[in-house]
Image (cartoon, rainbow, N blue to C red):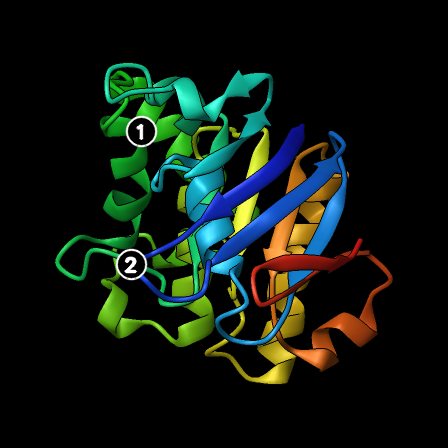
């Protein structure tokens, strides 16, 4: 699913965000990406999703050479990848249903497909009863479930979850983790970034550990 070779990324004159990072993730794996704040986890996710350009190296996601994409064909990558953020990034003036539907609208899906897929995604995270609510009316855990439904609605092959439990209490964090594990059991590749030792200790998934922009354990 992912092949990364000697990735290097710097911002300005400071220490590199990523230094000679190489790894392979097989289709259907569940991987924890961990490391202290500033280790390069978010930068790596941005590169995998095509939000950041590499300075050096090569990365293939689902057979797509990310470095060779431009604005005209970036959609070929993003249809394969769903992204979940720590701060949810929901649209506060849109309902739960419309937040999830929006991910389909931007790829030009027809209304019937949007309705069916949005309902199915909300059902998978247990939020059909909240479809008409607005994000500010929801708890943090519920907002994260909406974000997960939005990431799922286009049926991506790869899920990137960037500290998705960072703002949640331990009990809700475990529920969110179990949702990602359910996706993985259904065949999706999942990479979940976390610096929570508690999260890493409750499951025996593969670890990728970043330290100051370098992979120190895989």
Residue at coordinates 82% horizontally, 66% vertically from top-left?
Answer: 203
Question: Which disc is residue 206 wearing?
Answer: none
Residue at 28%, 22% (x, y): give it: 107
**Whether residue 102 is situated above or below residue 170 in the rendered picture:** above
Q: Quadrant of residue 139?
A: bottom left
At 51% from the left edge and 28% from the top edge, which residue is drawn? 155
Q: Looking at the image, is mark 1 or mark 2 nearer the viewer?
A: 2
- Residue with the most extreme right position: 204
The x and y percentages for residue 105 are: 23, 28
Query: In the visual, does 39 lie left or right of 34?
Result: left
Residue 13 appears in view: yes
Label 1 residue SS: helix
Residue 149 in sight here: no
**Foreground residue among 204 and 96:** 204
Residue behind mark 1: 104
Residue 189 falls in which quadrant of the image?
top right
Q: Quadrant of residue 151?
A: top left
Left or right of 35 on screen, residue 16:
left
x and y, in percent, of residue 206 in the image: 81, 54
Q: Where is residue 91 in the image (x, y as percent from the top left)?
A: 20, 56
Mark 1: few/some/many CA within 10 Å (<14, 14-19, 20+): many
Q: Which of marks 1 and 2 is nearer the N terminus?
A: 2
Residue 58 vertical position relative to residue 147 in the rendered view, above or below: above
In this view, the residue farthest toward the left is 93
Q: Nearer the viewer, residue 155 or 2?
A: 2
The percent position of residue 154, horizontal first and vertical second, equals 44, 29
Observer-nearest of 1 and 181: 1
Residue on which the image places disc 2: 12
């Amino acid at each position: 699913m992912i092949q990364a070779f000697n990735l290097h990324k710097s911002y300005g004159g400071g220490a590199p965000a990523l230094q000679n990072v190489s790894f392979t993730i097989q289709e259907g794996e569940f991987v924890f990406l961990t490391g202290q704040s500033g280790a390069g986890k978010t930068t790596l996710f941005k590169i995998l999703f095509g939000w950041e350009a590499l300075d050096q190296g090569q990365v293939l996601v689902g057979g797509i050479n990310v470095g060779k994409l431009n604005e005209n064909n970036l959609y070929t990558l993003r249809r394969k990848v769903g992204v979940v953020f720590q701060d949810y990034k929901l649209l506060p003036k849109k309902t739960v249903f419309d937040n999830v539907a929006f991910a389909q609208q931007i790829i030009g899906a027809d209304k019937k497909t949007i309705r069916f897929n949005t309902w199915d995604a909300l059902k998978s995270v247990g939020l059909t009863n909240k479809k008409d609510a607005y994000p500010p009316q929801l708890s943090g855990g519920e907002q994260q479930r909406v974000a997960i439904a939005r990431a799922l609605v286009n049926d991506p092959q790869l899920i990137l979850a960037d500290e998705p439990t960072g703002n949640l209490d331990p009990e809700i964090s475990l529920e969110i983790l179990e949702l990602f594990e359910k996706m993985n059991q259904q065949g999706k590749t999942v990479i979940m970034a976390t610096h929570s030792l508690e999260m890493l200790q409750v499951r025996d998934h593969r670890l990728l550990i970043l330290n100051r922009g370098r992979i120190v354990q895989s």
